[in-house]
Amino acid sequence: MNILIPHNWLKEYLETNASPKKIADCLSLCGASVEKVIKKNSNYVYDIEITTNRVDMMSVLGIARELSVILPQFGIKARLKKDPYKLLDQRPSPKYGLKRILDLTIQDSKICPRFTAVVIKNLKIKPSPKLIQERLILAGLRPINNIVDLTNYLMRELGQPFHAFDWNEIKKQKMVLRLSKKGEKITTLDGKTFDLPGDDIIIEDGDKRIIDLCGIMGGKNSQITSKTKSILLFVQTYDPRLIRKSSMNLSQRTEASALFEKSPDPEMVLPALYKGIDLLKKNAQGEIGSKIIDVYNKPYKVKNVDLNHLLIEQYLSFKIKPIKVIKILKSLGFETKYKQSKNTYLVSIPSWRAKDINLQEDLIEEIARIYGYHNLPSKLPRAVVGYQSPNKSDLEWEKKIKTLLKGWGLTEIMTYTMQSRKQIINFNLDPTFHLEIKNPLIQDWQYLRKNLLPSILSVIKDNLGKSDNLKLFEIGDVFIPQNNNLPLEKRKLAIVFSKDRFFELKGILESMFKEIGILKVVFKKAKNINPSTWQSAKTATIYAKKNGQEINLGKIGLLSEVKTNFEIKDELILAYLNFDNLTRLASKKKIYQPIPKYPALIEDLTFTLDRSVYYGSLEKLILNTNPLVKKVEFLNKFKRNLSLRIYYQDSKKNLTDKEIEKIRKQIILKVQRKGWGRLLGKV
Amino acid sequence: MKESLHNLRNEALALIQEARDIKEINSLKISFLGRKGKLNEYTKKFSELKKEEKIELGQLINELKKAIEGALRRKERSLKSDQPKKTDWFDFTLPGKRPEQGHLHLVSQAIAEISDIFEKIGFVRVRYPQVEWDWYAFEALNMPKNHPARDEWETLFIKAPPHKKYGQMVLTPQTSSGQIREMERLKKPPIKMINIAKCHRRQQDITHTIMFHQFEGLLIDKNISIANLKGVLDYFAKSFYGPERKTRLRPFHFNFTEPSFEVDINCPFCLGKGCRTCKSGWHELGGAGMVHPNVLKASGFDSKKYNGFAFGFGVERTFMMRSGIKIDDLRLFYSNDLRFLWQF
């Protein structure tokens, strides 16, 4: 949380000559991060980010206390003044002569650990003194009148929220502090009316009116007006979880709720109330009109933590004297006893740090940060652990494949892991079998994807008209639901080219398979595909052969109507591969074959083929005809005429024309016998 | 005599080698081979010699003459070929024939670099689930039940029955869940992990995307100090950003570390002094800290014997801290606009 602290207000609690720049630098290094120092006329304002565990620092007082410890570390004198905790002892005890005039019921002390209130009467409502108004404006708060301003002023000064009710609006002088029931209504000071979700802390008066949404904002029905004469000044702490829940549920975020949900110190409640009474007397001529009510069932019992000196030195990585440790802790309010025999400390935690400090590591943090992290040395730890990553091969192949595809002119995209219902349906898939997000941010991201392609088609749609040569790929995760378990996270490789460039994309796949050592791959006409997603005539399933098995690597094919659902007119050719199978089959194995001593004889043949003969079958047939056929290359295909090049080679001698003539005739004969076609021209 | 002929040869060849234009070549030709040239000087001395000497010297002079003529010819040719001719004007400013240019996503590029850097100092890269049980995402990381990160305004929950032991199913909001997984896998120190993965948080605006990437370092061993963390972070900063860059730690708060730090990197322009672009001299990089004893205990490690540090940085943010890459809207990373992707 960020708060604004004006410099001159800070000086009310901090005695120092440090410049605002110096204060900001030192606080950032050792306390809380000062994001900006804003100069306003002759004044400076610090914009400070304070972490949620340090609610004690979310105030002028808290920052002053930190600085009174930090600045001396940088050789600058600084001292905390007017510490309200210390001033408490000097207060006269509440006047017994006055009556307790409020009829109070607290349903459960757990929801309100400390409750204080007092009636202040004979008030004069008017604008606050100029100094208070100025400080409020600098601190980002809006001055209203001397009563409302006082509650805001003290909240920023002490980090404890206040509230003031118009005493005459608390009907029958009765309050019931309880949890709300679902559907109860309240209109808050800002005029908003809420239907309460239930279990919100509220106060009901004697006429059963809800007069306070506790810890968040007061009710409009009991607010301070220009006619107010007496108020009930009100300082509490509440169950932080309930405050956060209500304020988030209702989207009613106030500074008070932001403080209350972080557990401010109940020990501050009474000093704060006294401070409030003082200011009301001074700025509004008020008088105490009742006995002070203080319901506090479980007062703070001092908590002790043991601290081992050697552990401090281990964390800091150098020797430090116990006296230095004690000095740092004491300055932060921790009473510390050093036991020399055990080389340990017994540290008493002050009430304002009780929630935050539980372990010796918490204390080491205090010592190390005040000493200054910037003053610690920098040393690399030992280098080697000696085990391998379970994901090693997966990660290596991923990097290799990405680099290859990039090198071949493809562009990598990265899409969100979530999809909308519409995207899924548009790709002819069923949202039912997807994992669904319980609390989606927007409908576009409602399901965890089971398929990359809907996301990729959306990207193509968004990029229509930017290029007529799209070549995109993504390696991404999909989530397959499982019963009573986490989903399977499978990885997929999708490649998409604009236009019908089947063989260009197939070529990319073939080169990629070769580069990653998947050498035996076959493309077969795909079966059981949805014809409104893939054009069945031009879609193939890709298999890798290993140990006599065929392992499905994925698909390549042209998209059919499905693309119109994504408003894409052009043809798209897509490959969708099981990335996990790719990396499982990929291999770094390389085989050396002796370089042939005798040259190959090469000849080109053209066949006129029957319509349904696959080139792949023809190639296989030729290769299997004779071991001297070393290689078959496709040259071109025009209508039904297919030309190919055959390499004949013998490792032991030069081949003669006669020898290969025999093989050639065998080939032609086999093709004819199978009824596949005939040779064009003469042998 | 032989010796002086030898010297003459060296002199001639050296002068020819240094000649800069045809004019010089011509004057060298005259001075060595001309009628009154240096070679002829020797021929003139012929009459004084004996017969055998005449033959020998004659051969030497002939050889020398050929050598000088040859050198002159070659030099002349090379000088002439360097002369610009009107006919062979060549436009080398025309673009070359480039191979088609592909592009890796910025995040892929960043991840490749980041993992290389950490692997060099012995961190082992791993990958863990994005959809996780509450236990791994929060509970074992010492996040209290009421921590804001665990409520439905910050974390995305999955509609699925909760696990009896591990709780609800969530999209993990930080790579720290990998800490628990890695400790569970290895069962004992030492651990040196770098986990790079997608994370999800329920927020989408100019500085946040609902999906983003983090890299998480974890080291667990004996006697680990804050200084060790500083050593690793400085090594990373120098490797990734440049030798003059360094990091600094500031106090912060995370539930899974104690002490906790925010890590800053010094500004590339002023190196930390403070300038117009950075104001304070430093830019925020990410979070880090010493592993909280409760986190060690949750994974069955003896927190009295072992300790360690962890850090988690956003990949996108880390990359943008490089000078020259000022991307004003983080959502551009995942808009997949080709005009963006093609710039990198």
Image: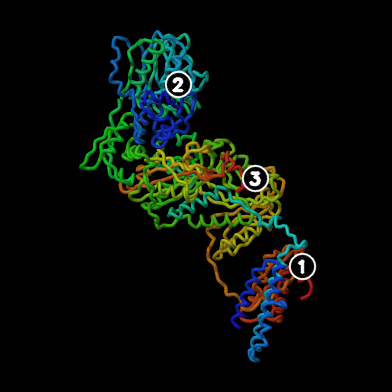
Which sits in the foreground, B65 or A146?
Answer: B65
Q: Chain of mark 2?
A: A
Asked whether disc 1 touches disc 3, contact meaning CB atoms under 8 Å apart, the reply is no
Q: Quadrant of the N terminus of chain B?
A: bottom right
Question: Count the marks: how many?
Answer: 3
User: Mark 3: which secondary structure?
Assistant: helix
Label 1: chain? Answer: A
Residue designated by label 3: B339
Q: Which residue is mark 2?
A: A135
Q: Residue furthest front?
A: B48
- Can you say whether A343 is above or below A355 in the image? below
Q: Which mark is residue A608?
A: 1
Label 3 Cα neighbours within 10 Å, binned few <14 / some 14-19 / many ≥20: few
Q: With respect to residue A408, does A357 lie above or below?
A: above
Location of residue A461 by image quarter: top right
Which of disc 2 and disc 1 is earlier in sequence?
2
